[in-house]
Amino acid sequence: MGLDMKIAELVADETSEKALRAKKLLDINRIKKAIPDEAFEKSLMRSLWYMFFDYACIGASMYALHALKNSGIYDELPFVGQCAATLAHWTVAGFFMWCIFVVGHDCGHGNFSEYEWLNDLLGHVTHGSILVPYWPWRLSHKRHHMFHNHVDKDYSHEWVTAEKKAAVAYPMTEFADNNPWIAPILPFVGWQLYLLGLPDGSHYFPLPGIPFTGARLWDETPTHEMVKCVVSTSVVIGFATMLYTCVTSDLWTLFQFYYAPVLVFGWWLVCVTYLQHHSPESVVYSESNWKFVLAAFETIDRRFGFGIDTLHHHITDGHVVHHLFFTKIPHYNLPIATKALVTYLNENDIGSVYKFEDTRDFPIRLTKYMADFGFNAVELKPGQSVPTQKSVDESTKNSESVKAKPKIH
């Protein structure tokens, strides 16, 4: 009889024969053997092709708007027409900036090529050109992958449980809980706030308390990583200065052609990342019951449709296998690796642990989930039955009545 458990139910079950068998099958080495060797092959030429394609699309969008404005046609358009043309550029350029980030994301994982120096060089190009400090992002993102769905050690976004909120004040989380209207706005600024320092620490300044209190990113971090942060920040400043000079020092032109698309790129990043790791069934684990492979299956593969999954390099519909082998499989091999993973799970009657959802309504889904449960998390504790998002919502509301909050997080 096949396994009919979700991954959290499997983690919670420490005694049944089915659960013990499934956990044995969910061994990283067994899974790796089920994936074709070609999925682990890194091709510099393919990586470069995708990088140039994405930059070409960004450049084409910028050129189209520039040509339209200089042709005289733009000035003759009604205001609504001018807004539509500008918005079209923001949409296209912002999306392909997100695609460039995904290519640079491969650099950070060592999957762009077999050469570390080239990965770092092009990582700075792809990230610096969209105002992301490469080395600090690589540092925090590596920790996210090493501890995905760990209640305390995961990075990129905090998992705020009812117990945490009862003991410590989380102003940003509480603000989002009490103001659901912010759900459609937050994705546009969330990425910028994260880079500035909320909640892990600044990716621009390797110092605690600048500009926000709390900087676990730099706690017990070697000095050479702090030096790397300064280098990456300098690259970002260099790109920003170059772009400012290219638009003849006109801030509105810089915003219209470049920074507004950067905000759209941030929306895509928050949208994809949030939906990869949040659903009504998502749970997190503590040190006592967290396991790398099992927690990786809390990740959700989603199909956005409309050609989007292909254009942004299968970061949505190949994310489970990416979390299992984040330093080994380049983005263009995620489809064949995912297919092999799903085949392995189904052939061994443990396919129920794999999460996949058709999410063509992703803008609506993102807003709904952010409004419904925001940054609140469900923690599965040892010996506990699997809680639901509804139960955590109720316990979270109860925790808000606790007055004694000794410190601000």
Image (cartoon, helix red, strand yellow):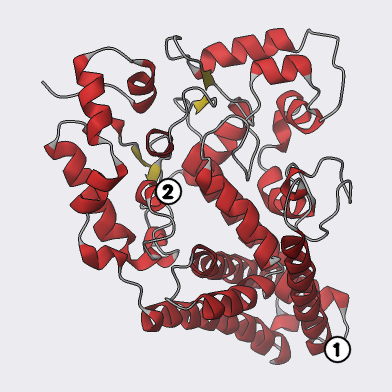
* First reached walking from the N terminus: tag 1 or tag 2: 1
Within 10 Å of the Cα at label 1, are there few (<14), some (14-19), or many (20+) other Cα atoms? few
Q: Residues within 10 Å of mark 2 (few under 14, many from 20)?
A: many
Of badges 1 and 2, the one in the foreground is 2
Q: What residue type is labelled 2?
A: His
Above or below — where is 103 with respect to 383? below
Residue situated in front as seen by the camera: 127 or 187: 127
Quarter assignment of residue 66: bottom right
Q: Along the horizontal axis of the image, is 241 left or right of 341?
A: right
The outermost residue toward the bottom is 71
Residue at the spot of label 2: 323
Q: Give the alpha-carbon distance from disc 1 to disc 2, as whole Å.
A: 43 Å
- Rendered residue at 39%/64% (across/down): 331
Q: Where is residue 149 in the image (x, y as percent from the top left)?
A: 52, 34
Q: Position of residue 176 (x, y in %)?
A: 73, 31
Element type where label 1 sits in the image: loop
Residue 322 shows up from this direction: yes
Closer-to-camera residue (83/409):
409
* Number of numbered discs visible in the structure rendering: 2
Tell me, for residue 76, which label it has, or none.
Answer: none
Q: In which quarter of the image is the N terminus?
A: top left
Q: Which amino acid does label 1 sit on?
A: Thr
Q: Quadrant of the C terminus?
A: top right
Q: Looking at the rendering, which quadrant does residue 80 occupy?
A: bottom right
Circle 1 residue: 248
Q: What element carries label 2?
A: helix
Task: State the residue at coordinates (49%, 26%).
Answer: 283
Contact flag, marks 1 and 2 (Cβ < 8 Å): no
For the residue pair 35 and 258, the one nearer the viewer reads as 35
Q: Splitting the image into 4 quarters, where does residue 72 fall?
A: bottom right
Q: Is residue 380 above or below residue 221?
A: above
Front-most of 345 and 251?
Answer: 345
